[in-house]
Structure formats: structure tokens, C-alpha cells
Amino acid sequence: MLRSGADNLSITHPAPDWPPGGHAVWVRRVTLDYSECGIGVTSLTQMSFGGSMPAFASRVREPGPGHPTSGAPEAARPAGLLSPAGLAAALRRNWLFACLLAAGLVLRILTQLAYRPALLYIDSVKYLFGAYAGNDPPGYQLMLKVFLGVGTLPMVAAVQHLLGLAMAVALYLILRRRGVARWLAALATAPILLDAYQLQIEQSVMPDTAFETLIVAGLVFLLWAPRPRTWMVLLAGLALGTSATVRQIGEIFILPALVFLLAVVPGWRAKLTQAVALVAAFALPIVVVSFRNYVTIKHFSLAPYAAGTVYGRAAAAADCATLKVPSYERELCPPRQVQLRGPDWLNHGAGSPIKHVAPPPGMRHISFAADFSRRVLLQQPLRIAAAIGTDSIKLFSLRRLTYPGDPSIARWQFHRDYPVYRPYITVRDGQLHFNRLTPAGRVKLIAKGQRFGGGEPAVSPRLAAFLRGYQLHGGYTPGPLFLLTVLAGLVGSLGMLRRRASPAQRATAAACLLTFLSAVAVLLASDAFEFSWRYQLPALVTLPPAGALGITMIVGYLAARRARRPAPAAVGLAGQQAPAQWDTQAQPDGQPRTQPPEQSDRESGIQPDGQPPTQPPEQPDRESGIQPDGQPPAQPPGQPDGQPLSRPGRGSGWPVPGPAGSPGSDSPRP
């Protein structure tokens, strides 16, 4: 069926068994954008089914006089996507994703109503009041400062919930553009939509939702087109660079982005141009924020005091008996019992050596801790690597648990009461109190009351109990699913090495490579400091898409192998052997597909032996309409006079190569 709309031309045709004796091909819908190929006769159109089906070409014409939409006024033609009818049709086609999106919306509304004005954490005082300047990049703090000038804390949580939904929509669209099936693309968005830990962080005044949003934005800009244009590369660089001003670990994204550009951009000059554009755009927000820190705290860096956070990992993994350090650093290497308390306690605990061991005269405390960490890394790198590896596999555990030495997972769980974190976040007489610790260890009040609006802290007991039960009893992404996505993403990324892959398959493999490398980079870089379930949240927006793209590549590869297998010999109607199966796999480097053995060249009309083309026995000449005996063309049985030739019960047929009278030929079946 041929259908013409305001913006596209669609063809729906249930294809028969084609090629003869080969793999069954089912063409569901082909949409051609008028802005790219014009309204007239369309040029060759490549169709790919998730990278799994062979590509082939067809020529499409506008509907003829007999088509229902031909000559019809614009109002009578199928409606666009933004119309009610078009929107309803889109919802029917994408019903699974629509259901998941609706479920995610309902969960976010319940979360918003359960905790007012928003959830707060220890670090929230950094982002609301600029406490402990230099410990974290100020990107999220600057965003809040602008937003809270006109908004309130409940509005912050609401915007972050909307960003969570927007990330799911963006990931679904990009997966569909890269050939992933609708059902698989929808399932890949389920973690970001339904994971209770994601809901909790969106309700919190924390930078993680903004960080994830910037990651998704950078991926979308790079993957929207098979080969990103320069303006797309610039926007991707700005988004990924800005993520580093929100969480410094975002600096790692420059590596997978560069690898992706070098893999998909043809020509070394173009590669160099795109790479320079990416690096420049990526560095711009980092330089701007670093200069802001130089003006305010006299340090040109995103987080000049964050180097001390490396100490926890180094001190927990060090073998103090064999470590060679200066005498003044010896006390920084804790005994085994203290090491078991983990990197987080060693960085922030009041009893940690870094809190009470003084550096020698003339050495700054931050340099003191950084020098010790560097010695551990250089002398005992395998111990550091083993500790990071042990933490990285915790993501794949079946249940969400607090492992010895890790921050408590209760920090990121819903509670029946409004959570407080003494002495930083407390509630007195129904009012919020925000405090900080001075270098001397004294508690100093920063602010109290409804400074940012939204009312006093309150909890809806029933909603909070429901959300907590949902989170603790399966409302999270299981670790084995993450493991599956890692394996699928790895295999799919290797598809870039296939020399015979079609352009559609390479585009899918390139997208898999970018998302997979981004996931591995951000998760390993986070685990290099310490393991926290909060730091695993970027996996929700990177690993499931990588897994979906990898599964698409694997299925496509298996289908292509089946399509290339020789078909069993079959006897034709005339007692001759049926032609062997065609090699429908797209040829490398854009070369045309080879013709099947002993099959005439349908484009040139030349037979294998060089003789002029001959018509099959008793087959009408399709171009001239002359029958073999010279008589005028006869209509097939049951075909009205004057009507075009069509397959019975098929509507307006789409000619597909095939022998006369066989499934896929132009002639009607007997």
C-alpha cells in the first residue's frame, strides 16, 4: 500500500518469499523524507532492519491516478504526527514505550508528593550555599543559583523529574534511528524510567540528574546522524564538557567521543577537523568555570581541593609493610583494621589519618595527601587495580547491598520519615537547619527556615511507605541485566571491525561503540576513587542502550549468516533445478550486489553466456506488453479490464524479482 502525507511517503508491502528459496523478507514500512530526496521519482533507497536484514534498492513513484490519495485535497490526506490522528497512530506503533513512559511519569508524581519540599543530602549545602568551595566543581551550584532566583526547591525536584523523562525519550529516539527494534528500544529505557534509585536522586538537590542529562545530550548530538556534522560535534563537546563542571569525572568523556569520531569520520583531514572542534568545545566550559574559581578562590581548576579524595583509595589498598615513603608520611598509611573501613571513611571520617596528621612545615595539606597517594600508585599499582576491579564488579550483584567499607546504601533509599544528616542537615521546631563544619571541627549555622520556599519539611507516610517497599523489593535494575548489557555492548562494538558490514550495520556498531565506551569510562573512573551506588547511576543511561545496540548487531549478524547459506536443491515446475539463493548481503565499499549463478543481469539484460535476453516461456514482455504469440496482453483471471496488474488480495503490489509464477514475481499466481 502506498500512502502519501504532508511530510513523507510511506510504502507498506507484505513481501513474499524473496529471493526464491532464500530468506523470507518482510517489508513493513519505508518512509522517505521529501526534504532529502524530493517529491518526484525517488532515487535508490537503502532499507535495513536493525542491521540484520540485507540492504536492497527499489524505485518508488508518487501515487498514480487510481490511488486513494492522488489528487485529494491536503485535508483529506493522512494527518501529520502533531495532529490527534497522527499522535494516536504513533502511540499505537510505540505502545510499549508509551506504557513505560506513563509508568515513569506516575512514579515521579508520587515521589514529588511524598517528600516536600525536596530531599537533601550532606553535599546539598555545597550546592545551595557554596560551602566548602573548591571541593567540587561549581557547575551545579551555578545552575541552582540562577534557577532559585525565580523558583523554589519543589520546582528544582520537578524539573529534575522532567529531565528524567526527557532522557528516556531521547534515548528511545536515538535507538530507533540506529535500527533498534521498537520493543528492544523501549526496554532499554525502562531502567531510567522505573529504577527507584533514579527517582530518589531526581527528588534530591544533588547534581547527578544534571550530570546524566548532559551525558545523554552529548550522545544524542553525536549519534543523531550517521556521520555527525561539525555543528553537532560542537554541541556534543559543549554538553560533555559542561558535565565535567557538574561532576569532575565527566572529563573522561573526551576519550570515547574522540574514538567515535575517528571511527566514523572518513578522511584524515576531516577526522582532524572534527577532533579539533570537539576538543575546543569540550574545553570551553571547563576553562570558563576554572577561571571563575581563579577569581573567587585563587585556583585555576575545577575542584582544586578534590585531590585529597584520591587518598582514601590509596590508603585502603596500600601494603604499608613494603611501601617506601618519607618518615613524615608514614602515619598516613593506616593499619589493617582502619583500612577495612573503606575509602569513603578514610577521606571524610573524623578519625581518618588525613584529618589529624599534620604536614611538615612549608607543605600544604592537599599536597601532603596527594604525594602519599602518588607513591602508592607508583609502587603498588596492581593493588590499586585489584581494588578498583573488585569494586567494579559489585554493579553486577543480584541485590543492592552495602558492602564492607562502602558508603551506606541507605543514603540513596526512600525513608518513611524525612531524612536528616547531622550535623549538616537537621530539622528543629519544624524548620530546616543548614550547617557546616569549620576547620576546627565546630558546627556553624549557614541558614534555616524556608529560605528557598516550598514549605516546611514533610512526608506523606503512605506514599513514602509505598516508594520504600517498591525500591527494596525489586524496583531497581538487577545486576545480571547490567552484565548482559556489558557483554552485548562489547560484542556489538566489535562489529566496527567487520569488513563486509553494510553502512546500516556500521552505523549501529558505531553507536554501540560510543555508548559502551562511555559507560565503561565513567564507571571505572568513578570506581577509581570509591564505590558508591550513587556513582553507578550513569550506567542507567549508557549500558542499556549499549546492550540494545549490541543485541541488534548480534541478531543481524546471525540473520545475515543464515541468508548466505546455500538453499537445498529444489526441482522447478519444468523439471529444472531452482536457482541458488542470492547473496543479498550488501557488498563492502558500496559495490553493487553480485547476481546469482546462472541468473540474467536484470539491469543490463545480458545473459551469462553473452546472448541477448530472452523472455521466460509463456511470459509476457513486461515493457512492451506483447504476448509471446504476438497477441495483445491478456488480463489474468479475475482481473478487471483496464486495471493495473496486481497480486490477488494484495492491493497494489510492489514488483520484486523472482521467476514467473513464483512468490515474488510480477505475474499473478495460478
Image: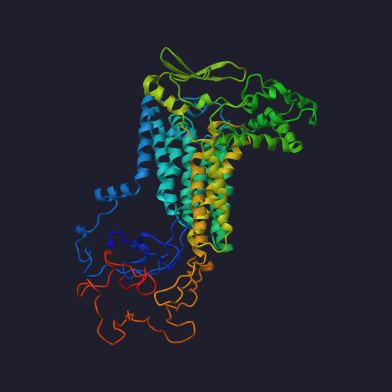
Count up the numbered dots.
0
Quarter containing the C terminus: bottom left
Q: Is residue 391 left or right of residue 411?
A: right
Q: Quadrant of residue 643?
A: bottom left
x then y, percent, for residue 568: 49, 67
x then y, percent, for residue 276: 56, 55
x then y, percent, for residue 24: 42, 62
Q: Residue at x 40, y 44 (%)?
A: 169
Q: Is residue 26 left or right of residue 226?
A: left
Task: Please say if 163 is above or below 458.
Answer: below
Q: Could you say which is closer to the camera, residue 587 or residue 613?
A: 613
Q: Residue at x 46, y 63 (%)?
A: 54
Q: Could you say which is closer to the camera, residue 486 or residue 21?
A: 21
Quarter containing the N terminus: bottom left
Q: Is residue 401 left or right of residue 625?
A: right
Task: Please say if 599 is above or below 24.
Answer: below
Q: Could you say which is closer to the camera, residue 664 or residue 201?
A: 664
x then y, percent, for residue 253: 56, 45
Q: Is residue 152 visible?
A: no
